[in-house]
Image: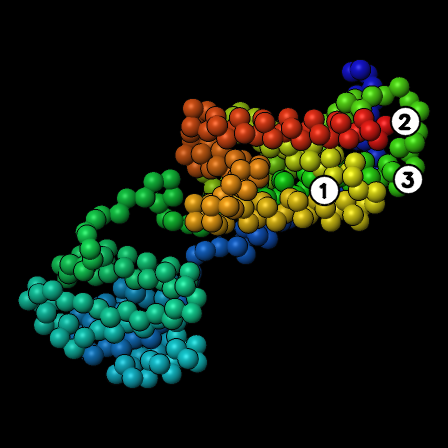
């Protein structure tokens, strides 16, 4: 059995070496996608177009404006003496936010009396507006409040303390999920096309005439791509650390083990698709539909699962990327041990076992 598995594995590796385009795509695509999406996909908002209505016109009010501009988030696009033109500026999208400083700002701050700043936002993009509002509150609380001893008017007062991602960089949150997305899509497509290629070239008939069994063919087809996927995952993780400052606080051994479980499930699903599809085009389409969309939308990669409808939350239980992303963030960002993510690892083991079993049964029927 071992000899036949190794022979099939060597055959697949030799085919990959001859088909250098496929090998380059499998090794290079995850890294290229990580770089493209890692830089393009971000929840951070910068260069916010700010309009300033300074009714105080004092040194104190100018220091407030300077604090906003020095934060690195805001760029002043308009300076006004009254607030009436703000509506036209928002409509023309000249500004995204406006800071209105009251006329009695200087006198109230010098007397240590409670005062407030009016911050106006364009709410047509709710997510961006919430982010910008958070920036404004942070600046008022940490810089202006400490300068003038101003109390922030809120339901409660608290000093922020952020663990694991103190700068609140969205890349540190998104890149681990992006790694899961890329590995899932590439692993499913790789093995789905591998078997279908045998069908289109007619070599599947030759395999039926050999003494090789379905499980041996399955292992021989899976192991090469498991090796390629592991190399690709290591390269992508290195780039995540080098380019996006993603910390790797946990054990690399545990990280490798969880990644292998995830890849095994993805490769098994690709083999299962290949036993259904008769052409590479159909296999490619089924691979994308069954791996890309669930991983992107239903894994917690971008959208929190807790905010989804109950029906969708139940459906996410069969999405393997959900468990891998959770375990990956625990290991990479928090340095957590198996006691914190063993449930996710168990779910990946169950998923990989079921998928590989289904692929084996389908392979037996094909052979």
The reply to whether the C-beta atoms of the residues labelled 3 and 2 are less than 8 Å apart is: no
Residue 154 percent across, percent down from the top left: 20, 57
Q: In terms of sequence position, does the residue under pointer 3 or pointer 1 come before the other?
A: 1
Residue at 59%, 53% (x, y): give it.
Answer: 36
Residue at 38%, 64% (x, y): give it.
Answer: 129
Q: Which residue is mark 1?
A: 189
> Does 214 appear above or below 98?
above
* Residue 130, image quadrant: bottom left
User: Would residue 100 be found to the left or right of residue 169 on screen?
Assistant: left
Q: How many marks?
A: 3
Residue 309 percent across, percent down from the top left: 47, 49
In front: mark 3 or mark 2? 2
Q: Which residue is mark 2?
A: 208
Residue occupying the far front of the picture? 311
Residue 340 percent across, percent down from the top left: 42, 28
Q: Which mark is residue 329?
A: none
* Residue 213, image quadrant: top right
Asked if one can make out residue 71 in the rendered structure from this viewpoint, the answer is: no
Q: In terms of sequence position, does the residue under pointer 2 or pointer 1 come before the other?
A: 1
Q: Secondary structure at mark 3?
A: helix
Q: Considering depth in this image, is 293 or 222 the residue closer to the camera?
A: 293
> Does 346 appear above or below 36?
above
Q: Secondary structure at mark 1?
A: helix
**How are the residues colored?**
rainbow
């Amino acid at each position: 059995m071992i000899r036949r598995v190794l022979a099939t594995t060597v055959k697949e590796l030799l085919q990959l070496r001859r088909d250098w385009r496929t090998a380059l795509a499998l090794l290079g695509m995850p890294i290229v996608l990580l770089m493209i999406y890692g830089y393009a996909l971000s929840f951070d908002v910068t260069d916010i177009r700010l309009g300033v209505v300074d009714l105080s016109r004092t040194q104190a009010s100018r220091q407030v404006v300077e604090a906003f501009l020095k934060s690195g988030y805001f760029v002043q696009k308009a300076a006004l003496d009254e607030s009436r033109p703000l509506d036209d500026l928002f409509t023309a999208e000249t500004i995204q936010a406006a800071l209105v400083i009251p006329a009695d700002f200087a006198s109230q701050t010098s007397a240590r009396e409670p005062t407030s700043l009016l911050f106006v936002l364009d709410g047509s993009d709710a997510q961006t507006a919430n982010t910008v509002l958070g920036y404004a509150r942070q600046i008022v609380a940490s810089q202006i409040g400490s300068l003038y001893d101003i109390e922030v008017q809120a339901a409660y007062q608290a000093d922020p303390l952020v663990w694991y991602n103190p700068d609140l960089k969205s890349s540190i949150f998104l890149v681990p999920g992006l790694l899961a997305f890329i590995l899932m899509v590439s692993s499913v497509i790789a093995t789905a096309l591998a078997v279908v290629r045998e069908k289109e070239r007619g070599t599947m008939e030759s395999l039926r005439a050999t003494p090789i069994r379905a499980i041996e063919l399955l292992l021989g087809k899976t192991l090469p791509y498991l090796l390629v996927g592991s190399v690709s995952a290591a390269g992508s993780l290195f780039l995540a650390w080098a380019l996006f400052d993603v910390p790797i606080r946990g054990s690399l051994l545990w990280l490798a083990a969880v990644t292998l479980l995830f890849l095994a499930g993805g490769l098994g699903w690709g083999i299962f698709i290949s036993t259904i599809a008769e052409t590479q085009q159909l296999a490619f389409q089924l691979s994308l539909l069954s791996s890309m969309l669930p991983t992107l939308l239903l894994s917690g990669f971008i959208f929190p699962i807790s905010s989804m409808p109950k029906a969708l939350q139940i459906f996410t239980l069969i999405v393997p990327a959900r468990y891998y992303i959770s375990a990956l963030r625990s290991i990479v960002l928090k340095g957590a041990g198996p006691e914190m993510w063993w449930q996710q690892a168990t779910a990946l083991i169950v998923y990989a076992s079921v998928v590989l079993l289904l692929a084996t049964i389908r392979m037996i029927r094909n052979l």
